[in-house]
Image: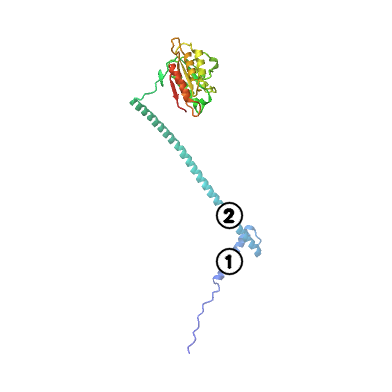
Amino acid sequence: MSKRQRIKRPPIEIFNLSFLDIIACAFGAIVLLVLLAKNNEVPAELSAEDVAIRIEQLMAAQNRVAALQSQLETQQDELISAQTQAASTLDAEQLLESSIPRAQQSLARLQGQAQSLREEIRREQARLNVASVPETPSLNVGGIPTDAEYVIFVIDTSGSMSVGRGWQQVTSVVGDIIRNHPELKGFQVMSADGDFMFSNTSGRWLTDSESMRRRTIQGLQNFRGGGSAPEVGMKRALQLYRNSPGKISMYVFGDDFRPGTMDAIVTEITDLNRGPDGQPRWRIHGVGFHRERWGDAPQFAAFMKAVVDRNRGAFVALPST
Protein backbone atom coordinates (compact mmCIF):
# COMPACT_ATOMS: atom_id res chain seq x y z
CA MET A 1 0.00 0.00 0.00
CA SER A 2 1.37 3.41 -1.00
CA LYS A 3 2.11 6.08 1.48
CA ARG A 4 -0.66 8.51 2.20
CA GLN A 5 0.18 11.88 0.67
CA ARG A 6 0.30 14.82 3.14
CA ILE A 7 -2.23 17.54 2.44
CA LYS A 8 -0.53 20.94 2.01
CA ARG A 9 -2.27 23.59 4.12
CA PRO A 10 -1.99 27.37 3.49
CA PRO A 11 0.01 29.37 6.02
CA ILE A 12 -1.97 31.07 8.75
CA GLU A 13 -2.05 34.91 8.25
CA ILE A 14 -2.14 36.56 11.61
CA PHE A 15 -2.80 40.08 10.24
CA ASN A 16 -5.62 39.58 7.77
CA LEU A 17 -7.96 42.34 6.28
CA SER A 18 -10.37 42.44 9.20
CA PHE A 19 -7.61 42.91 11.66
CA LEU A 20 -6.15 45.79 9.62
CA ASP A 21 -9.56 47.48 9.49
CA ILE A 22 -9.80 47.28 13.25
CA ILE A 23 -6.31 48.71 13.65
CA ALA A 24 -7.10 51.57 11.22
CA CYS A 25 -10.33 52.47 12.99
CA ALA A 26 -8.59 52.43 16.34
CA PHE A 27 -5.84 54.65 15.01
CA GLY A 28 -8.41 57.09 13.56
CA ALA A 29 -10.25 57.23 16.87
CA ILE A 30 -6.98 57.97 18.67
CA VAL A 31 -6.18 60.78 16.20
CA LEU A 32 -9.71 62.22 16.63
CA LEU A 33 -9.34 62.16 20.40
CA VAL A 34 -5.98 63.89 20.15
CA LEU A 35 -7.46 66.63 17.94
CA LEU A 36 -10.42 67.12 20.25
CA ALA A 37 -8.14 67.26 23.22
CA LYS A 38 -5.88 69.82 21.53
CA ASN A 39 -8.61 72.18 20.19
CA ASN A 40 -11.08 72.07 23.04
CA GLU A 41 -8.75 71.33 25.91
CA VAL A 42 -10.48 68.05 26.62
CA PRO A 43 -9.16 66.36 29.74
CA ALA A 44 -6.71 63.56 29.13
CA GLU A 45 -9.05 60.94 30.34
CA LEU A 46 -12.50 60.77 28.69
CA SER A 47 -15.12 58.21 29.13
CA ALA A 48 -16.79 56.52 26.19
CA GLU A 49 -19.88 58.60 26.85
CA ASP A 50 -17.87 61.86 26.68
CA VAL A 51 -16.31 60.77 23.41
CA ALA A 52 -19.73 60.05 21.95
CA ILE A 53 -20.96 63.49 23.04
CA ARG A 54 -17.93 65.14 21.47
CA ILE A 55 -18.52 63.29 18.24
CA GLU A 56 -22.17 64.37 18.19
CA GLN A 57 -21.14 67.99 18.79
CA LEU A 58 -18.64 67.78 15.96
CA MET A 59 -21.25 66.36 13.60
CA ALA A 60 -23.75 69.05 14.66
CA ALA A 61 -21.15 71.73 13.97
CA GLN A 62 -20.46 70.22 10.58
CA ASN A 63 -24.19 70.22 9.84
CA ARG A 64 -24.45 73.91 10.80
CA VAL A 65 -21.49 74.70 8.59
CA ALA A 66 -23.17 72.85 5.73
CA ALA A 67 -26.45 74.73 6.34
CA LEU A 68 -24.67 78.08 6.44
CA GLN A 69 -22.80 77.17 3.30
CA SER A 70 -26.09 76.32 1.59
CA GLN A 71 -27.63 79.60 2.79
CA LEU A 72 -24.61 81.51 1.53
CA GLU A 73 -24.89 79.86 -1.87
CA THR A 74 -28.60 80.74 -2.00
CA GLN A 75 -27.89 84.39 -1.18
CA GLN A 76 -25.12 84.45 -3.76
CA ASP A 77 -27.58 83.10 -6.34
CA GLU A 78 -30.09 85.82 -5.38
CA LEU A 79 -27.38 88.46 -5.64
CA ILE A 80 -26.40 87.23 -9.09
CA SER A 81 -30.09 87.23 -10.13
CA ALA A 82 -30.56 90.80 -8.83
CA GLN A 83 -27.43 91.95 -10.63
CA THR A 84 -28.66 90.32 -13.82
CA GLN A 85 -32.07 91.98 -13.47
CA ALA A 86 -30.46 95.36 -12.79
CA ALA A 87 -28.31 94.97 -15.86
CA SER A 88 -31.41 94.05 -17.88
CA THR A 89 -33.27 97.12 -16.56
CA LEU A 90 -30.31 99.33 -17.40
CA ASP A 91 -30.20 97.87 -20.90
CA ALA A 92 -33.94 98.54 -21.32
CA GLU A 93 -33.50 102.13 -20.11
CA GLN A 94 -30.61 102.70 -22.47
CA LEU A 95 -32.66 101.17 -25.29
CA LEU A 96 -35.58 103.49 -24.49
CA GLU A 97 -33.32 106.54 -24.37
CA SER A 98 -31.81 105.61 -27.68
CA SER A 99 -35.28 105.08 -29.21
CA ILE A 100 -36.50 108.61 -28.33
CA PRO A 101 -34.36 110.38 -30.97
CA ARG A 102 -35.52 107.83 -33.53
CA ALA A 103 -39.15 108.50 -32.63
CA GLN A 104 -38.58 112.25 -32.89
CA GLN A 105 -36.98 111.79 -36.28
CA SER A 106 -39.94 109.65 -37.39
CA LEU A 107 -42.39 112.32 -36.19
CA ALA A 108 -40.49 115.05 -38.03
CA ARG A 109 -40.46 112.90 -41.14
CA LEU A 110 -44.22 112.29 -40.93
CA GLN A 111 -44.87 116.00 -40.40
CA GLY A 112 -42.79 116.76 -43.45
CA GLN A 113 -44.73 114.20 -45.46
CA ALA A 114 -48.03 115.70 -44.27
CA GLN A 115 -46.88 119.18 -45.29
CA SER A 116 -45.82 117.87 -48.68
CA LEU A 117 -49.20 116.18 -49.06
CA ARG A 118 -51.04 119.41 -48.22
CA GLU A 119 -48.96 121.30 -50.77
CA GLU A 120 -49.69 118.64 -53.35
CA ILE A 121 -53.42 118.88 -52.62
CA ARG A 122 -53.28 122.67 -53.05
CA ARG A 123 -51.45 122.30 -56.35
CA GLU A 124 -53.99 119.74 -57.51
CA GLN A 125 -56.87 122.00 -56.52
CA ALA A 126 -55.28 124.87 -58.40
CA ARG A 127 -54.81 122.63 -61.42
CA LEU A 128 -58.46 121.64 -61.33
CA ASN A 129 -59.50 125.28 -60.81
CA VAL A 130 -61.23 124.51 -57.53
CA ALA A 131 -62.76 127.70 -56.21
CA SER A 132 -61.40 128.85 -52.88
CA VAL A 133 -63.22 130.83 -50.20
CA PRO A 134 -63.15 134.51 -51.16
CA GLU A 135 -61.48 136.89 -48.75
CA THR A 136 -64.06 139.61 -49.51
CA PRO A 137 -67.63 138.73 -48.48
CA SER A 138 -70.08 138.28 -51.30
CA LEU A 139 -73.11 140.54 -51.70
CA ASN A 140 -75.27 137.44 -51.99
CA VAL A 141 -74.75 134.42 -49.72
CA GLY A 142 -76.98 131.38 -49.93
CA GLY A 143 -79.60 133.33 -51.86
CA ILE A 144 -79.77 136.05 -49.17
CA PRO A 145 -78.65 139.57 -50.18
CA THR A 146 -75.95 140.90 -47.85
CA ASP A 147 -75.84 144.54 -48.94
CA ALA A 148 -77.31 145.91 -45.69
CA GLU A 149 -75.55 148.58 -43.64
CA TYR A 150 -77.42 147.65 -40.47
CA VAL A 151 -78.62 144.24 -39.33
CA ILE A 152 -81.02 143.37 -36.54
CA PHE A 153 -81.45 139.83 -35.24
CA VAL A 154 -84.71 138.63 -33.69
CA ILE A 155 -83.93 135.26 -32.10
CA ASP A 156 -86.18 132.64 -30.52
CA THR A 157 -84.44 132.00 -27.19
CA SER A 158 -86.77 129.25 -25.95
CA GLY A 159 -85.52 125.91 -24.63
CA SER A 160 -86.16 124.02 -27.86
CA MET A 161 -83.58 126.16 -29.65
CA SER A 162 -80.92 124.97 -27.18
CA VAL A 163 -81.47 121.22 -27.53
CA GLY A 164 -78.19 119.34 -28.00
CA ARG A 165 -75.74 121.65 -29.74
CA GLY A 166 -78.57 123.82 -31.05
CA TRP A 167 -77.48 127.07 -29.42
CA GLN A 168 -73.95 126.66 -30.68
CA GLN A 169 -75.44 126.45 -34.17
CA VAL A 170 -77.39 129.67 -33.54
CA THR A 171 -74.33 131.64 -32.40
CA SER A 172 -72.32 130.29 -35.31
CA VAL A 173 -74.92 131.46 -37.85
CA VAL A 174 -75.07 134.91 -36.24
CA GLY A 175 -71.30 135.23 -36.58
CA ASP A 176 -71.41 134.08 -40.21
CA ILE A 177 -74.10 136.61 -41.12
CA ILE A 178 -72.19 139.50 -39.53
CA ARG A 179 -68.95 138.53 -41.29
CA ASN A 180 -70.67 138.29 -44.67
CA HIS A 181 -71.98 141.87 -44.72
CA PRO A 182 -69.14 143.91 -46.27
CA GLU A 183 -70.93 147.26 -45.81
CA LEU A 184 -71.99 146.65 -42.21
CA LYS A 185 -71.93 149.70 -39.92
CA GLY A 186 -73.97 148.47 -36.97
CA PHE A 187 -76.20 145.69 -35.69
CA GLN A 188 -78.51 144.76 -32.83
CA VAL A 189 -79.67 141.55 -31.12
CA MET A 190 -83.16 141.00 -29.70
CA SER A 191 -85.13 138.04 -28.42
CA ALA A 192 -88.41 136.90 -29.97
CA ASP A 193 -90.09 138.49 -26.94
CA GLY A 194 -88.66 141.90 -27.89
CA ASP A 195 -85.94 142.09 -25.21
CA PHE A 196 -82.49 143.42 -26.12
CA MET A 197 -79.45 141.31 -25.35
CA PHE A 198 -77.69 144.51 -24.22
CA SER A 199 -80.60 146.02 -22.30
CA ASN A 200 -79.21 149.57 -22.19
CA THR A 201 -78.94 149.84 -26.00
CA SER A 202 -82.64 149.87 -26.86
CA GLY A 203 -83.27 152.01 -29.96
CA ARG A 204 -79.55 152.33 -30.75
CA TRP A 205 -77.17 150.37 -32.95
CA LEU A 206 -74.11 148.47 -31.77
CA THR A 207 -71.18 149.85 -33.74
CA ASP A 208 -69.60 147.12 -35.84
CA SER A 209 -66.06 146.30 -34.70
CA GLU A 210 -64.05 143.21 -33.92
CA SER A 211 -64.38 143.77 -30.18
CA MET A 212 -68.16 144.27 -30.39
CA ARG A 213 -68.51 141.14 -32.51
CA ARG A 214 -66.65 139.14 -29.87
CA ARG A 215 -68.77 140.62 -27.07
CA THR A 216 -71.93 139.76 -28.99
CA ILE A 217 -70.96 136.13 -29.60
CA GLN A 218 -69.96 135.77 -25.95
CA GLY A 219 -73.20 137.40 -24.78
CA LEU A 220 -75.28 135.05 -26.90
CA GLN A 221 -74.07 132.12 -24.79
CA ASN A 222 -76.32 133.29 -21.94
CA PHE A 223 -79.07 134.97 -23.98
CA ARG A 224 -81.62 132.19 -23.52
CA GLY A 225 -84.85 131.34 -21.75
CA GLY A 226 -87.46 133.36 -23.69
CA GLY A 227 -90.56 132.44 -25.66
CA SER A 228 -91.40 131.41 -29.22
CA ALA A 229 -93.46 134.36 -30.50
CA PRO A 230 -91.21 135.92 -33.18
CA GLU A 231 -93.85 138.44 -34.26
CA VAL A 232 -93.49 140.26 -30.91
CA GLY A 233 -89.80 141.01 -31.43
CA MET A 234 -90.30 141.75 -35.13
CA LYS A 235 -92.98 144.37 -34.47
CA ARG A 236 -90.98 146.05 -31.71
CA ALA A 237 -87.88 146.24 -33.91
CA LEU A 238 -89.88 147.82 -36.74
CA GLN A 239 -91.43 150.36 -34.37
CA LEU A 240 -88.06 151.37 -32.84
CA TYR A 241 -85.91 151.46 -35.98
CA ARG A 242 -88.30 152.01 -38.90
CA ASN A 243 -87.09 155.57 -39.48
CA SER A 244 -83.38 154.77 -39.22
CA PRO A 245 -81.43 155.78 -42.33
CA GLY A 246 -79.47 153.32 -44.43
CA LYS A 247 -80.09 149.84 -45.71
CA ILE A 248 -81.47 147.59 -42.97
CA SER A 249 -82.04 143.84 -42.89
CA MET A 250 -83.84 141.84 -40.21
CA TYR A 251 -82.96 138.20 -39.58
CA VAL A 252 -85.56 136.16 -37.71
CA PHE A 253 -84.33 132.91 -36.12
CA GLY A 254 -86.80 130.32 -34.90
CA ASP A 255 -88.17 126.78 -34.83
CA ASP A 256 -91.81 127.34 -33.83
CA PHE A 257 -94.90 129.44 -34.53
CA ARG A 258 -98.37 129.05 -33.11
CA PRO A 259 -101.02 128.28 -35.76
CA GLY A 260 -104.26 130.14 -36.35
CA THR A 261 -102.94 133.72 -36.45
CA MET A 262 -100.63 133.68 -39.45
CA ASP A 263 -102.51 135.79 -41.98
CA ALA A 264 -103.27 138.65 -39.60
CA ILE A 265 -99.70 138.80 -38.25
CA VAL A 266 -98.13 138.67 -41.72
CA THR A 267 -100.35 141.57 -42.80
CA GLU A 268 -99.52 143.61 -39.68
CA ILE A 269 -95.76 143.15 -40.11
CA THR A 270 -95.93 143.99 -43.81
CA ASP A 271 -97.86 147.20 -43.07
CA LEU A 272 -95.33 148.25 -40.41
CA ASN A 273 -92.51 147.75 -42.90
CA ARG A 274 -94.12 149.67 -45.77
CA GLY A 275 -92.44 152.93 -46.77
CA PRO A 276 -93.96 156.11 -48.19
CA ASP A 277 -93.57 154.71 -51.69
CA GLY A 278 -95.49 151.59 -50.76
CA GLN A 279 -92.37 149.41 -50.89
CA PRO A 280 -90.81 147.54 -47.94
CA ARG A 281 -88.32 149.64 -45.96
CA TRP A 282 -86.28 146.64 -44.79
CA ARG A 283 -85.38 143.27 -46.09
CA ILE A 284 -86.80 140.64 -43.71
CA HIS A 285 -85.12 137.24 -43.85
CA GLY A 286 -85.94 134.03 -42.02
CA VAL A 287 -83.62 131.31 -40.75
CA GLY A 288 -85.40 128.12 -39.70
CA PHE A 289 -83.92 125.60 -37.27
CA HIS A 290 -85.17 122.05 -37.10
CA ARG A 291 -85.18 120.37 -33.68
CA GLU A 292 -86.12 116.70 -33.34
CA ARG A 293 -89.29 116.26 -31.21
CA TRP A 294 -89.30 119.95 -30.31
CA GLY A 295 -90.96 123.05 -31.72
CA ASP A 296 -92.90 123.18 -34.98
CA ALA A 297 -90.38 123.90 -37.72
CA PRO A 298 -92.87 123.48 -40.63
CA GLN A 299 -95.24 126.03 -39.08
CA PHE A 300 -92.39 128.53 -38.57
CA ALA A 301 -91.22 127.97 -42.14
CA ALA A 302 -94.71 128.64 -43.50
CA PHE A 303 -94.98 131.86 -41.48
CA MET A 304 -91.56 133.18 -42.49
CA LYS A 305 -92.02 132.33 -46.17
CA ALA A 306 -95.18 134.39 -46.17
CA VAL A 307 -93.31 137.29 -44.52
CA VAL A 308 -90.17 137.24 -46.70
CA ASP A 309 -92.19 137.02 -49.92
CA ARG A 310 -93.83 140.33 -49.04
CA ASN A 311 -90.70 142.04 -47.66
CA ARG A 312 -87.93 141.46 -50.23
CA GLY A 313 -86.33 138.74 -48.14
CA ALA A 314 -85.35 135.09 -48.32
CA PHE A 315 -85.87 132.06 -46.12
CA VAL A 316 -83.24 129.42 -45.34
CA ALA A 317 -83.99 126.19 -43.45
CA LEU A 318 -81.04 124.65 -41.61
CA PRO A 319 -80.75 120.96 -40.70
CA SER A 320 -80.71 119.79 -37.09
CA THR A 321 -77.34 119.41 -35.36
- Per the model, the C-alpha gap separating discs 2 and 1 is 28 Å
Q: Which residue is mark 2?
A: 67
In the image, residue 184 lies at what x, y percent? 45, 15
Neighbor class of circle 1 (other Cα within 10 Å; few <14, some 14-19, many 20+) is: few
Which residue type does callout 2 highlight?
Ala
In the image, residue 13 lies at what x, y percent? 54, 74
Neighbor class of circle 2 (other Cα within 10 Å; few <14, some 14-19, many 20+) is: few
Residue at position x 63%, y 60% in the image:
54
Q: Horizontal placement of 22 versus 120: left or right?
A: right
In the image, residue 23 lies at what x, y percent? 57, 68
The circle drawn on residue 25 is: 1
| 212 versus 83 height, above or below | above
Residue that extends furthest to the top in the rendered view of this protein: 276
Quadrant housing residue 143: top left
Closer to the camera, 242 or 245?
242
Q: Looking at the image, tell me whether mark 2 or mark 1 is earlier in sequence order.
A: 1
| 188 versus 293 height, above or below | above
Q: Secondary structure at mark 1?
A: helix
In the image, residue 81 lies at what x, y percent? 51, 47
Residue at position x 57%, y 52% in the image:
71
From where the camera sits, is residue 71 visible?
A: yes
From where the camera sits, is residue 172 visible?
A: no
Tell me the colour scheme of the image.
Answer: rainbow
